Amino acid sequence: MNALTTIKTTFAILFFQQIAFAQETKKETAAPQYTIENCVNHFEIDKATKTKVGYQYWFGDKNFTQENTLKMSIVEPGKSTHAPHRHVEEEFFYILEGTAEFYLDGKTKIAGPNTSFYCPSNMEHGIKNVGNTDLKYLVIKKYLR
């Protein structure tokens, strides 16, 4: 075997080892499984962390969600902004006032103030007002460019 053949063979071996390593790493960092149970999160003071100025409460870990924008919506009783739908962008809702029905992948859950709802990318989801007062909530969404 000449020097050029040895270099090519060594390069090929290293290349395939890197591919194998990348595939193993990818398996170890698989995306979380999203369910209605881990996408709805209700604030509880006893689960909050005390700080010098009050408390911190994380509704979504950075490894569960991504950076997003923020919008407030107000919906009249018995109404929703639109029917359940899906889109590429993920969304995060936070209930300020009223009673919401969250819909995610064929299942629903009713919740009130201080509750969050995470909608993963491309999963059918929706939110509607099932109370008798206005529903006020925040929407955090990453808009793709």
Image (cartoon, grey):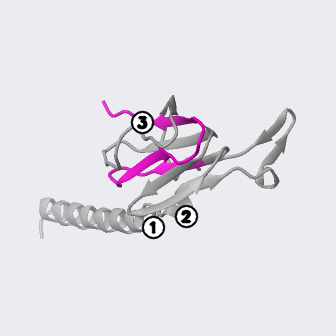
For marks 2 and 1, the one nearer the N-term is 1
Circle 3 Cα neighbour tier, 10 Å, few/some/many (<14 / 14–19 / ≥20) = some
Q: Nearer the viewer, residue 29 or 64?
A: 64
Give the amino acid at mark 2.
Answer: Glu
Between the residue at mark 2 and the residue at mark 3, the CA separation in whole angstroms equals 22 Å
- Extent of the magenta region: 116-145
According to the picture, the residue beneath numbered tag 1 turns out to be 28
- Mark 3 lies on a secondary structure that is loop
Magenta region includes residue 85: no
Closer to the camera: disc 2 or disc 3? 2
Tell me the crowding category of disc 1: few under 14, some 14 to 19, or many 20 or more residues within 10 angstroms, Cα based.
few
Q: Amino acid at mark 3?
A: Lys
Q: Quadrant of residue 23?
A: bottom left
Disc number for residue 37: 2
- Residue 20 sits above or below residue 114 on the image: below
Residue placed under numbered mark 3 in the picture: 142
State which quarter of the image contains the N terminus. bottom left
To which quarter of the image does residue 110 belong?
bottom right
Residue 123 appears left or right of 62: left
Of 119 and 107, which appears nearest the observer? 107
Q: Position of residue 123 (x, y in %)?
A: 35, 55
Q: Is disc 2 placed on a helix, strand or loop?
A: helix
Q: Pick whichever of labels 2 and 3 is earlier in the sequence.
A: 2
Q: How many marks?
A: 3
Query: Which dot, 2 or 1, sits closer to the camera?
Result: 2
Lateral position of residue 16 relative to residue 78, left or right? left
* Quadrant occupied by the C terminus: top left
